[in-house]
């Protein structure tokens, strides 16, 4: 494998071994990816930390020369979505409201990766305050899908997914509130993980909907996703939603027979025929390998979107009330009164999608409508119970990640109902707290990536990774690269 081939398609473990063996330099690796970001011009990054990254790379090379190589990500370039805090760097959430805000502390996930030797390349583009499914709502402009620049990369973690797909970093972190890691991973042909709620610290993540938000990795493969997850998971006393469970450690792939449930969403008339064909062929391969595969009735996909919208927008209305022009963030220049300042600041600072969700959430939280909020929690509990029952019999639940491949720019931005439908299959995991991972599962006739979603019971990421690694051992879809 040449150096270019290694950097473009090597695993974290392979790149790390090459660094330790002196076959490649850390500075050369960092410069390789930074130049790709500039050359590709996909608007994946809001800011590149070139000077800082190169300085850290040179320090790492000096350690290699001294034989002092430590850490699971020593010298590995990575990126963070622009809603994950790094002290001393801008933290804008791709919004005019926070365009001049600088983080005053580090997120827990960043500190864990940095402690393992990872080198931060920059902050990636996203839908404003993580509200969107296409990265079209960013104050800094849309990110382009590297497979087709006329199409969206998905969202809200579209910048992170496109950066990994275009091989501008080795891995990136995103946040997932209703599918914002898995949906763009499917659209961009990469692997994206939403861990069990509470298994990865949210400390340092700017809140959208606190009961649904979860940080997770976007990677080239399930193996890499497991490696990143093994570092960032774990209890954090600074996060009140963090769960005290045994820390997950990276495991070797061990072949076994799985009991696989297939959601009846595979027969939904709204499902793109190319996705149905690809997943049907994959299921046939699984059966031939001797795994038990059975269809199950899972009727909650049609309820997941309205329930997700009610809960997420209600929480967004509450969480975003803090942006009032008084304490931090944008403040309008001209106003006649305190109320006028609030109105103009929020009207000018927030984009249209964010304002729409705040208004909808505020309406839901009005006293006469509060029953909608309470009822939505009841439906979320039913989804959680349904999944719990499914995993009493099966190891795995398979669904498509999305109903369609990546759509064109402007196609859905003015149709919120259609845009929200992008989250129909992924938001189930956010409502239930279950882990879910999207892996590449083929291509449409137009050459667009197709994603397969794997769901397991809560805190059973091990089974999920084992099954995902089994599937990726049988295919090369996760190694496919977009044309440059």
Image: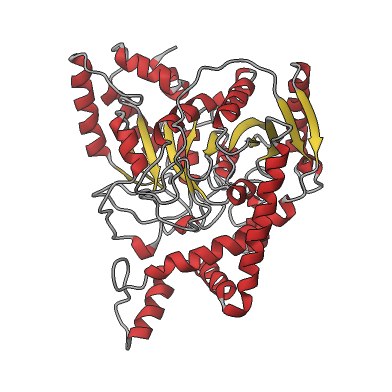
Which of the pair 11/166 is nearer the observer? 11
199, above or below 66, in the image:
below
* 456 horizontally vs 85: left or right: right
Q: Residue 406 occupies which quadrant of the picture?
A: top right
373, above or below 238, in the image:
below
| Residue at left offset 44%, top offset 12% | 1
Query: Can you name the residue that lies furthest to the bottom here?
Result: 336
On the question of residue 148 being in view, the answer is no
Q: Position of residue 421 (x, y in %)?
A: 67, 54
Which of the pair 142/173 is nearer the observer? 173
Q: Position of residue 98 (x, y in %)?
A: 34, 61
292, above or below 399, in the image:
above
Which of the pair 421/456 is nearer the observer? 456
| Residue at left offset 45%, top offset 50% | 241
Q: Position of residue 337 (x, y in %)?
A: 32, 88
| Residue at left offset 55%, top offset 33% | 191
Q: Residue 19 occupies which quadrant of the picture?
A: top left
| Residue at left offset 58%, top offset 34% | 189
Q: Position of residue 281 (x, y in %)?
A: 77, 26
On the question of residue 463 being in view, the answer is yes
């Amino acid at each position: 494998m040449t150096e270019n081939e290694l950097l473009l398609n090597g695993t974290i473990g392979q790149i790390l071994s090459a660094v330790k063996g002196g076959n490649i330099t850390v500075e050369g690796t960092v410069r390789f990816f930074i130049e790709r970001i500039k050359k590709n011009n996909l608007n994946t990054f809001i800011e590149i930390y070139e000077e800082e990254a190169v300085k850290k790379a040179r320090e790492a090379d000096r350690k290699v020369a001294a034989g002092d190589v430590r850490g699971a990500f020593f010298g590995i370039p990575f990126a963070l979505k622009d809603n994950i805090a790094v002290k001393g760097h801008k933290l804008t959430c791709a919004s005019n409201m926070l365009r001049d805000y600088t983080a005053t502390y580090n997120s827990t996930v960043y500190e864990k990766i940095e402690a393992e030797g990872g080198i931060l390349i920059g902050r990636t583009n996203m839908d404003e305050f993580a509200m969107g499914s296409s990265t079209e709502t960013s104050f800094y402009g849309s990110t382009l899908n590297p497979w087709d620049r006329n199409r969206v990369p998905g969202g809200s973690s579209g910048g992170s997914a496109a950066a990994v797909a275009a091989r501008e970093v080795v891995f990136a972190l995103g946040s997932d509130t209703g599918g914002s890691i898995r949906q763009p991973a499917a659209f961009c042909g990469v692997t994206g993980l939403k861990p069990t709620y509470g298994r990865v610290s949210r400390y340092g993540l700017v809140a959208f909907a606190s009961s649904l938000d979860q940080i997770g990795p976007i990677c080239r493969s399930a193996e890499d996703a497991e490696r990143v997850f093994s570092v960032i998971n774990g209890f954090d006393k600074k996060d009140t939603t963090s769960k005290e469970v045994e820390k997950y450690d990276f495991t070797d792939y061990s072949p076994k027979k799985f009991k696989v449930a297939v959601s009846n969403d595979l027969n939904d008339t709204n499902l793109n025929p190319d996705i149905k064909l690809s997943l049907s062929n994959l299921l046939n391969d699984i059966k031939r390998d001797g795994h038990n595969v059975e269809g199950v009735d899972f009727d909650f996909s049609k309820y997941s979107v309205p329930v997700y919208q009610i809960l997420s927008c209600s929480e967004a209305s509450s969480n975003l009330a803090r942006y009032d022009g008084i304490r931090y963030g944008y403040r309008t220049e001209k106003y006649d009164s305190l109320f006028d300042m609030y109105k103009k600041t929020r009207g000018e600072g927030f984009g249209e999608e964010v304002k729409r969700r705040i208004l909808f959430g505020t309406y839901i939280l009005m006293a006469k409508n509060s029953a909608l909020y309470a009822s939505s929690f009841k439906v979320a509990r039913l989804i959680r119970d349904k999944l719990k029952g499914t995993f009493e019999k099966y190891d795995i639940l398979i669904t498509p990640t999305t109903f369609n491949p990546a759509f064109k720019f402007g196609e859905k931005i003015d149709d919120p109902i259609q845009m929200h439908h992008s989250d129909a299959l992924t938001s189930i995991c956010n409502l239930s707290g279950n882990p879910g991972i999207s892996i590449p599962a083929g291509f449409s006739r137009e050459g667009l990536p197709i994603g397969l979603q794997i769901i397991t019971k809560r805190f059973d990421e091990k089974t999920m990774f084992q099954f995902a690694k089994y599937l990726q051992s049988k295919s090369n879809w996760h190694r496919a690269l977009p044309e440059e």
